[in-house]
């Protein structure tokens, strides 16, 4: 199985962002990728009202992404926003998993980014259900951005059979934030004995995004093996990296380190 890390900046126009997904998925398919992972908020970047752009998983935006996946024979994972069912103007921060056979799944971000002075929960409703899916014969779990700070989610995904966990993000910039992102990606791979593909949006170059009081990306997407070793890492700017997944390392890590087997419950 080959994965493409598509470190791409989204803008505020969902239609223009669909064009980006199409272009970068075509590049990933040309490199024989089975899966292309984009960042969080690919439908529309943070820093603007999200309710007006939110659509259901069977809406036009997700349908167009599914069409791209089918055209190129590649599973596409990308962040979007779907309406929350509570009657408010809040949305779900959703990861769309668009399979080439037109299957479509959605994961709603569980841990909301109420940190560093930002309150995601003001406009976003929290999900509650972890998700593991099958891609190219392997079990793949998903998590979103701030979720990476919560090891329990990653071990729960491993318990559900995940061999790899993808983490689309739009990581907030600031002192020490790149270091935290790098440490957390490696730690979660070790916690769960999985491959972690952590894909962030790059450092923005658009002045409006730079000035937005919202997390818009720091780059440094990375693929980490289950021993915490960084297989590949992007820089701060837009980039596509394609790698084979070291799934054989998952079995080795689970046999040699055995953290999943040796856990003790404190509850």
Image: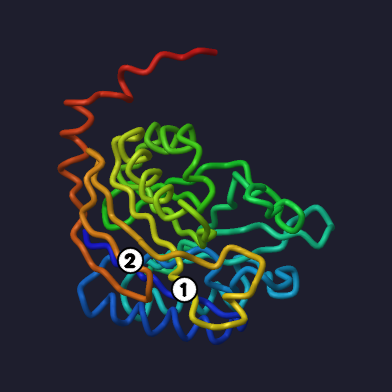
Q: Which mark is residue 203?
A: none
Vertical relation: 79 (above or below) 134: below
Q: Is residue 7 left or right of residue 229?
A: right
Vertical relation: 189 (above or below) 201: above
Vertical relation: 83 (above or below) 230: below
Front residue (pair 146, 57): 146
Q: Secondary structure at mark 2?
A: strand
Question: x%, y% of residue 221?
Answer: 35, 61
> Which residue, as the protein is rendered here, is positioned at the far front?
175
Residue at x-position 63% and y-position 73%: 59
Question: x%, y% of residue 24?
Answer: 36, 80
Task: Report the residue marked by disc 1.
Answer: 66
Q: Secondary structure at mark 1?
A: helix
Res 72 quadrant in image: bottom left
Q: How many marks?
A: 2
Could you tell which of marks 1 and 2 lies nearer the N-terminus?
A: 2
- Asked whether the beta carbons under mark 1 and mark 2 sit within 8 Å of each other, the answer is no
Q: Is residue 211 left or right of residue 231?
A: right
Front residue (pair 52, 139): 52
Query: Which part of the image, by quadrant, shows the C terminus?
Result: top right
Q: Residues within 10 Å of mark 2 (few under 14, many from 20)?
A: many
Q: Is residue 129 left or right of residue 152?
A: right
Task: Report the residue marked by disc 2.
Answer: 5
Q: Is residue 23 left or right of residue 18?
A: left
Q: Residues within 10 Å of mark 1 (few under 14, many from 20)?
A: many
Res 237 quadrant in image: bottom left
Question: x%, y% of residue 246?
Answer: 18, 49
């Amino acid at each position: 199985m080959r994965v493409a890390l598509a470190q791409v900046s989204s803008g505020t126009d969902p239609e223009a962002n669909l064009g980006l997904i199409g272009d970068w998925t075509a590049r990933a398919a040309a490199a024989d990728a089975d899966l292309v992972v984009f960042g969080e908020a690919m439908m529309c970047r943070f820093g603007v009202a999200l309710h007006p752009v939110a659509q259901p998983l069977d809406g036009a935006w997700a349908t167009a992404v599914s069409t791209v996946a089918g055209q190129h024979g590649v599973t596409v994972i990308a962040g979007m926003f779907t309406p929350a069912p509570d009657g408010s103007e809040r949305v779900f921060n959703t990861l769309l998993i668009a399979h080439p056979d037109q299957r479509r799944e959605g994961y709603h971000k569980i841990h909301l980014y109420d940190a560093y002075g930002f309150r995601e929960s003001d406009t976003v409703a929290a999900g509650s259900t972890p998700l593991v899916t099958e891609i190219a014969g392997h079990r793949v779990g998903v998590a979103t951005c701030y979720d990476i700070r919560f090891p329990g989610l990653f071990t729960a995904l491993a318990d559900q059979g995940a061999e790899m966990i993808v983490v689309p993000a739009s990581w907030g910039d600031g002192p020490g934030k790149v270091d935290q992102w790098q440490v957390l990606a490696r730690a979660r791979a070790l916690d769960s004995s999985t491959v972690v593909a952590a894909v962030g949006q790059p450092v923005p170059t658009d002045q409006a995004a730079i000035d937005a009081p919202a997390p818009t990306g720091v780059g440094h997407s990375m693929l980490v093996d289950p021993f915490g070793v960084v297989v590949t890492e992007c820089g701060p700017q837009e980039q596509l990296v394609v790698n084979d997944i070291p799934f054989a390392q998952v079995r080795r890590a689970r046999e040699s380190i055995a953290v999943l087997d040796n856990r003790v419950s404190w509850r």
